Image: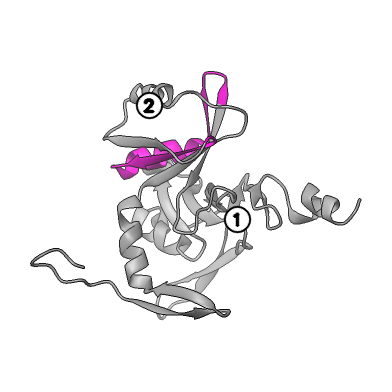
Amino acid sequence: MAPDGAKATHKMSATVYKGEAAVIFSRTDAEKLAAPFRWTLVGKFSHGRPSLEDIRKFFALLNLKDHISIGLMDYRHVLIKCSAEVDFNRIWTRGIWQLDKFPMRVFRWTREFHVLRESSLVPVWVELPNLLIHYFDKHYLFSILSPVGRPLFLDSAMAAGTHPSVARVCVEIDVAKPVMPRIWVAVEGESGFWQRIVPDNMPTYCSSCWRLGHLSENCKKNFTEGGY
């Protein structure tokens, strides 16, 4: 029941799925539920981890711009909820943090996140070779790269104008899907050009065990299940 004076706005329907009871929420409600976690990351420890207190102390020493909250999801995973996008980007794009003797890999939290599946969303540096110099603008670079993924930020040297030889942008890419090699760029009523898209050190992702670092054809899980 909604609180006094408030109206319940969520939409759900009780139904049946494969012969069993089910509840289905609207996509709008799901997005509202996820909105407070917009700048949230998941840290994963594979071989032991520090205490929660030590993890919090570590991040407190990073001189972040705003507040972050850290809590345990299970023995291996910690939820890192940032208040500022700049802190989110700094922690995520580092990839691996060394907390004393414990390495911690960082993933972006999404509504689909599960502790048994690593996210396939990864920050990747993307270069646009020989891009015309007047397109070296954040707004237009982000527009050009929007079909590739969600642009995050520009290379600092390029943004400062001290490295005008190549456009370089950090982009959130789903590495479980193919990345387009080029994009057509044109001005209305004028001729255009194909712009090459060159990801730098894009990691591989396994669709069998849902982990980064190898492809499905090289997954140990497939060899085990295949009887090898």
In this rendering, does residue 28 appear at all? yes
Give the residue number, with chain letter if any, for mark 1: 175
Q: Which mark is residue 56?
A: 2
Rendered view: 186 above or below 217: below
The percent position of residue 71, horizontal first and vertical second, equals 39, 36
Name the foreground residue: 217 vs 190: 217
Name the foreground residue: 137 vs 216: 216
Name the mark nearer the viewer: 2 or 1.
Answer: 2
The amino acid type, in three-letter code, at marker 2 is: Arg
Q: Residue at x 23, y 72 (%)?
A: 9
Q: For the view shown, which residue lies furthest in the left direction?
A: 5
Determine crowd level at label 1: few under 14, some 14-19, many 20+ residues with C-alpha closer than 10 A: some
Q: Residue at x 91, y 50 (%)?
A: 228
Q: CA distance from mark 2 to mark 1?
A: 30 Å
Name the foreground residue: 113 vs 216: 113
The percent position of residue 219, horizontal first and vertical second, equals 77, 50
Name the foreground residue: 181 vs 13: 13
In-image side of 90 versus 200 (left or right): left
Whether residue 89 is in magenta: the answer is: yes
In-image side of 38 versus 173 (left or right): left
Rendered view: 23 above or below 178: below
Rendered view: 90 above or below 39: above
Which region shows up in magenta? 75-102
